[in-house]
Amino acid sequence: MKRRSRRILLLVHGLFCGILLLLSSVQPGFDVSASQPKSICTDEIKVMPLGDSITTGKYSGQDTSDTIAGALDDIGYRKDLWEMLTAGGFSVDFVGTQSNGNVPAFPFSEPEHEGHNGWSDTQIADNIYNDGGDNWLSLNPPDVVLLHIGTNYLDSDPSDVQRILDEIDEYEADTGERVIVILARIINMVGGNPVVTQFNDNVETMVEARSEYGLDLFLVDMEDGAGLVYSVQPAGDMWNTIHPYATGYTKMAAVWMAAFEDLCQRVYLPFVYKEYPASGYLWE
Protein backbone atom coordinates (compact mmCIF):
# COMPACT_ATOMS: atom_id res chain seq x y z
CA MET A 1 0.00 0.00 0.00
CA LYS A 2 2.86 2.42 0.87
CA ARG A 3 4.61 1.74 -2.47
CA ARG A 4 1.33 2.26 -4.38
CA SER A 5 0.74 5.52 -2.51
CA ARG A 6 4.25 6.70 -3.39
CA ARG A 7 3.65 5.93 -7.09
CA ILE A 8 0.40 7.87 -6.97
CA LEU A 9 2.19 10.76 -5.22
CA LEU A 10 4.91 10.87 -7.87
CA LEU A 11 2.30 10.83 -10.66
CA VAL A 12 0.34 13.66 -9.06
CA HIS A 13 3.48 15.74 -8.58
CA GLY A 14 4.62 15.06 -12.13
CA LEU A 15 1.27 16.32 -13.45
CA PHE A 16 1.39 19.31 -11.12
CA CYS A 17 4.92 20.18 -12.24
CA GLY A 18 3.77 20.06 -15.84
CA ILE A 19 0.93 22.44 -15.07
CA LEU A 20 3.36 24.84 -13.38
CA LEU A 21 5.67 24.72 -16.38
CA LEU A 22 2.76 25.55 -18.69
CA LEU A 23 1.70 28.43 -16.47
CA SER A 24 5.26 29.73 -16.23
CA SER A 25 5.42 30.08 -20.01
CA VAL A 26 2.58 32.62 -19.97
CA GLN A 27 2.82 34.20 -16.52
CA PRO A 28 5.94 36.27 -15.75
CA GLY A 29 5.45 35.87 -12.01
CA PHE A 30 7.20 32.49 -11.92
CA ASP A 31 10.97 32.63 -11.49
CA VAL A 32 12.01 29.78 -13.79
CA SER A 33 15.49 29.37 -15.26
CA ALA A 34 16.07 28.33 -18.86
CA SER A 35 16.95 24.80 -17.75
CA GLN A 36 14.34 22.09 -17.25
CA PRO A 37 13.29 22.01 -13.58
CA LYS A 38 14.50 19.02 -11.60
CA SER A 39 12.31 16.92 -9.38
CA ILE A 40 13.93 15.69 -6.19
CA CYS A 41 11.54 12.74 -6.45
CA THR A 42 12.55 11.47 -9.88
CA ASP A 43 15.67 13.19 -11.26
CA GLU A 44 19.29 12.61 -10.28
CA ILE A 45 20.18 15.12 -7.57
CA LYS A 46 23.75 16.03 -6.64
CA VAL A 47 24.10 15.98 -2.86
CA MET A 48 27.03 17.43 -0.88
CA PRO A 49 27.38 16.07 2.69
CA LEU A 50 29.16 19.00 4.37
CA GLY A 51 30.73 19.26 7.80
CA ASP A 52 33.48 17.84 10.01
CA SER A 53 34.52 14.33 11.07
CA ILE A 54 30.92 13.41 11.87
CA THR A 55 30.23 13.86 8.15
CA THR A 56 33.39 11.97 7.20
CA GLY A 57 32.19 9.17 9.44
CA LYS A 58 35.05 8.94 11.88
CA TYR A 59 34.61 5.89 14.12
CA SER A 60 31.76 4.50 12.07
CA GLY A 61 32.15 1.26 14.00
CA GLN A 62 34.08 -0.62 11.34
CA ASP A 63 37.86 -1.18 11.36
CA THR A 64 39.05 1.33 13.96
CA SER A 65 41.99 -0.83 15.06
CA ASP A 66 43.91 0.14 11.91
CA THR A 67 44.09 3.91 11.57
CA ILE A 68 44.68 3.76 7.81
CA ALA A 69 42.08 1.12 7.00
CA GLY A 70 39.80 2.67 9.58
CA ALA A 71 39.87 5.99 7.73
CA LEU A 72 39.08 4.23 4.46
CA ASP A 73 36.21 2.45 6.17
CA ASP A 74 34.62 5.67 7.45
CA ILE A 75 31.08 5.67 6.11
CA GLY A 76 29.23 7.68 8.74
CA TYR A 77 25.59 8.34 7.96
CA ARG A 78 26.41 8.58 4.26
CA LYS A 79 26.30 4.92 3.26
CA ASP A 80 23.10 4.25 5.20
CA LEU A 81 21.50 7.36 3.72
CA TRP A 82 22.47 6.44 0.17
CA GLU A 83 21.03 2.95 0.63
CA MET A 84 17.82 4.38 2.11
CA LEU A 85 17.47 6.87 -0.73
CA THR A 86 18.14 4.24 -3.38
CA ALA A 87 15.65 1.83 -1.83
CA GLY A 88 13.13 4.67 -1.69
CA GLY A 89 13.38 5.36 -5.42
CA PHE A 90 15.55 8.46 -5.25
CA SER A 91 18.51 9.00 -7.58
CA VAL A 92 21.40 10.78 -5.87
CA ASP A 93 25.03 11.47 -6.67
CA PHE A 94 27.10 12.37 -3.61
CA VAL A 95 29.73 15.02 -4.45
CA GLY A 96 32.75 16.56 -2.76
CA THR A 97 36.54 16.70 -2.78
CA GLN A 98 36.85 14.02 -0.07
CA SER A 99 36.32 10.27 -0.42
CA ASN A 100 35.92 7.75 2.39
CA GLY A 101 34.18 4.43 2.66
CA ASN A 102 34.63 2.46 -0.56
CA VAL A 103 36.65 -0.62 0.42
CA PRO A 104 36.04 -4.32 -0.38
CA ALA A 105 34.65 -5.04 3.08
CA PHE A 106 32.21 -2.12 2.86
CA PRO A 107 31.52 -1.39 -0.83
CA PHE A 108 30.05 2.04 -1.36
CA SER A 109 29.76 3.50 -4.85
CA GLU A 110 29.12 7.07 -3.65
CA PRO A 111 31.94 7.79 -1.15
CA GLU A 112 32.45 11.47 -2.08
CA HIS A 113 31.70 14.12 0.50
CA GLU A 114 32.91 17.40 1.99
CA GLY A 115 33.54 16.33 5.57
CA HIS A 116 36.78 17.62 7.11
CA ASN A 117 38.08 16.06 10.31
CA GLY A 118 38.59 18.53 13.14
CA TRP A 119 37.35 21.53 11.19
CA SER A 120 35.31 24.32 12.74
CA ASP A 121 32.38 26.18 11.22
CA THR A 122 34.81 29.06 10.59
CA GLN A 123 37.03 26.85 8.42
CA ILE A 124 34.05 25.50 6.49
CA ALA A 125 32.88 29.08 5.85
CA ASP A 126 36.35 30.02 4.59
CA ASN A 127 36.30 27.30 1.92
CA ILE A 128 32.71 26.85 0.78
CA TYR A 129 32.78 29.57 -1.90
CA ASN A 130 34.68 32.62 -3.09
CA ASP A 131 36.30 33.53 0.22
CA GLY A 132 39.94 32.75 -0.52
CA GLY A 133 39.68 29.02 0.17
CA ASP A 134 39.02 25.89 -1.87
CA ASN A 135 35.69 26.99 -3.36
CA TRP A 136 33.95 23.63 -3.00
CA LEU A 137 30.65 24.74 -4.53
CA SER A 138 32.38 25.59 -7.80
CA LEU A 139 34.48 22.42 -7.80
CA ASN A 140 31.49 20.11 -7.27
CA PRO A 141 28.22 22.02 -7.75
CA PRO A 142 25.45 20.47 -5.62
CA ASP A 143 21.68 20.64 -5.83
CA VAL A 144 21.36 19.82 -2.13
CA VAL A 145 23.76 20.47 0.78
CA LEU A 146 23.45 18.47 4.00
CA LEU A 147 25.12 20.65 6.63
CA HIS A 148 26.09 19.38 10.08
CA ILE A 149 28.71 21.67 11.62
CA GLY A 150 29.68 23.30 14.93
CA THR A 151 31.09 20.53 17.15
CA ASN A 152 34.76 21.56 16.92
CA TYR A 153 35.82 24.69 18.83
CA LEU A 154 32.26 24.76 20.10
CA ASP A 155 30.66 27.97 21.28
CA SER A 156 27.10 29.27 21.17
CA ASP A 157 27.71 31.82 18.40
CA PRO A 158 25.84 31.02 15.14
CA SER A 159 27.64 33.67 13.06
CA ASP A 160 29.92 31.28 11.18
CA VAL A 161 26.99 29.07 10.22
CA GLN A 162 25.31 32.25 9.03
CA ARG A 163 28.40 33.02 6.96
CA ILE A 164 28.26 29.55 5.36
CA LEU A 165 24.68 30.22 4.34
CA ASP A 166 25.64 33.67 3.04
CA GLU A 167 28.37 32.14 0.90
CA ILE A 168 25.89 29.65 -0.55
CA ASP A 169 23.53 32.53 -1.33
CA GLU A 170 26.38 34.36 -3.07
CA TYR A 171 27.11 31.26 -5.15
CA GLU A 172 23.47 31.09 -6.19
CA ALA A 173 23.44 34.78 -7.14
CA ASP A 174 26.67 34.49 -9.13
CA THR A 175 25.80 31.31 -11.02
CA GLY A 176 22.02 31.28 -11.24
CA GLU A 177 22.08 27.76 -9.79
CA ARG A 178 19.75 26.84 -6.96
CA VAL A 179 21.02 25.02 -3.87
CA ILE A 180 18.72 23.51 -1.25
CA VAL A 181 20.35 23.52 2.19
CA ILE A 182 19.20 21.06 4.84
CA LEU A 183 20.82 22.30 8.04
CA ALA A 184 21.02 20.16 11.16
CA ARG A 185 20.72 20.99 14.79
CA ILE A 186 23.94 19.12 15.54
CA ILE A 187 24.12 16.02 17.71
CA ASN A 188 25.00 16.45 21.38
CA MET A 189 27.82 14.72 23.28
CA VAL A 190 28.11 11.92 25.82
CA GLY A 191 26.86 13.30 29.12
CA GLY A 192 25.08 16.16 27.37
CA ASN A 193 26.68 19.55 26.76
CA PRO A 194 24.36 22.55 27.33
CA VAL A 195 26.47 24.66 24.95
CA VAL A 196 25.45 22.35 22.09
CA THR A 197 21.79 23.02 22.82
CA GLN A 198 22.39 26.77 23.13
CA PHE A 199 24.30 26.76 19.84
CA ASN A 200 21.47 24.84 18.16
CA ASP A 201 18.85 27.21 19.54
CA ASN A 202 20.81 30.23 18.31
CA VAL A 203 21.31 28.67 14.87
CA GLU A 204 17.60 27.91 14.66
CA THR A 205 16.68 31.49 15.59
CA MET A 206 19.10 32.82 12.97
CA VAL A 207 17.79 30.47 10.28
CA GLU A 208 14.13 31.26 10.93
CA ALA A 209 14.88 34.97 10.34
CA ARG A 210 16.37 34.36 6.88
CA SER A 211 14.28 35.12 3.81
CA GLU A 212 15.08 31.75 2.19
CA TYR A 213 13.86 29.74 5.19
CA GLY A 214 11.18 27.35 4.00
CA LEU A 215 12.18 27.92 0.36
CA ASP A 216 15.86 27.02 -0.08
CA LEU A 217 16.72 26.41 3.57
CA PHE A 218 15.32 23.80 5.96
CA LEU A 219 16.14 22.50 9.44
CA VAL A 220 16.37 18.98 10.77
CA ASP A 221 16.73 18.04 14.42
CA MET A 222 19.67 15.67 14.93
CA GLU A 223 20.18 16.60 18.58
CA ASP A 224 16.89 15.17 19.87
CA GLY A 225 14.92 14.16 16.79
CA ALA A 226 17.30 11.39 15.72
CA GLY A 227 16.77 9.51 18.98
CA LEU A 228 20.48 9.03 19.71
CA VAL A 229 21.32 7.51 23.08
CA TYR A 230 24.21 9.66 24.30
CA SER A 231 26.32 7.01 25.96
CA VAL A 232 29.18 4.89 24.63
CA GLN A 233 28.27 1.65 22.87
CA PRO A 234 27.13 -0.98 23.49
CA ALA A 235 24.89 0.85 25.99
CA GLY A 236 24.34 3.78 23.62
CA ASP A 237 24.86 5.11 20.10
CA MET A 238 28.22 6.83 20.59
CA TRP A 239 31.72 5.52 19.88
CA ASN A 240 33.37 8.17 22.03
CA THR A 241 32.44 11.52 23.52
CA ILE A 242 31.55 13.24 20.23
CA HIS A 243 31.44 10.63 17.44
CA PRO A 244 28.51 8.29 16.88
CA TYR A 245 28.87 4.55 16.59
CA ALA A 246 27.37 2.78 13.57
CA THR A 247 23.94 2.69 15.25
CA GLY A 248 24.03 6.44 15.81
CA TYR A 249 24.96 7.13 12.19
CA THR A 250 22.04 4.97 11.04
CA LYS A 251 19.70 7.08 13.15
CA MET A 252 21.15 10.25 11.61
CA ALA A 253 20.63 8.81 8.13
CA ALA A 254 16.97 8.21 8.91
CA VAL A 255 16.50 11.91 9.77
CA TRP A 256 18.11 13.04 6.50
CA MET A 257 15.94 10.48 4.68
CA ALA A 258 12.77 11.90 6.23
CA ALA A 259 13.85 15.33 4.99
CA PHE A 260 14.22 14.03 1.43
CA GLU A 261 10.79 12.42 1.64
CA ASP A 262 9.30 15.74 2.70
CA LEU A 263 11.18 17.70 0.05
CA CYS A 264 9.95 15.26 -2.57
CA GLN A 265 6.42 16.34 -1.70
CA ARG A 266 7.01 20.06 -2.05
CA VAL A 267 10.21 21.18 -3.79
CA TYR A 268 11.07 21.29 -7.47
CA LEU A 269 14.29 22.78 -8.80
CA PRO A 270 14.90 25.52 -9.84
CA PHE A 271 11.59 26.82 -8.50
CA VAL A 272 9.32 25.77 -5.65
CA TYR A 273 5.67 24.93 -5.27
CA LYS A 274 4.52 24.82 -1.68
CA GLU A 275 1.60 23.32 0.19
CA TYR A 276 2.89 24.61 3.53
CA PRO A 277 3.30 28.05 5.12
CA ALA A 278 6.31 30.11 4.04
CA SER A 279 7.71 30.10 7.56
CA GLY A 280 9.59 26.86 6.92
CA TYR A 281 9.56 23.46 8.51
CA LEU A 282 11.56 21.76 11.24
CA TRP A 283 11.65 18.01 10.80
CA GLU A 284 11.52 16.10 14.05
Image (cartoon, grey):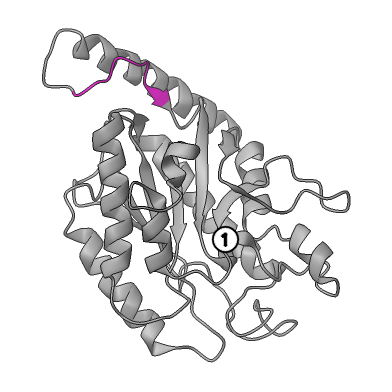
- Measured as percent of width and height from the top left, residue 99 is found at 67, 50
Q: Residue furthest front?
A: 132
Closer to us: 208 or 48: 48
Q: Quadrant of the N terminus?
A: top right
Is residue 4 among what the camera can see?
yes
Closer to us: 116 or 150: 116
The residue singled out by tag 1 in the image is: 55
Q: Quadrant of the C terminus?
A: bottom left
- Measured as percent of width and height from the top left, residue 56 is found at 62, 60
Q: Residue furthest right?
A: 104
Does 185 appear above or below 32? below
Which residue sits at x=18%, y=46%? 278
Which residue sits at x=28%, y=77%? 157
Q: Secondary structure at mark 1?
A: helix
Does 87 appear above or below 30? below
The local crowd at label 1, few if under 14, some if 14 to 19, many if 20 or more residues have their Cα within 10 Å, is many
User: Which region of the structure is painted magenta?
Assistant: 31-38
Query: What amino acid is labelled 1 in the image?
Result: Thr
Is residue 270 magenta-colored? no
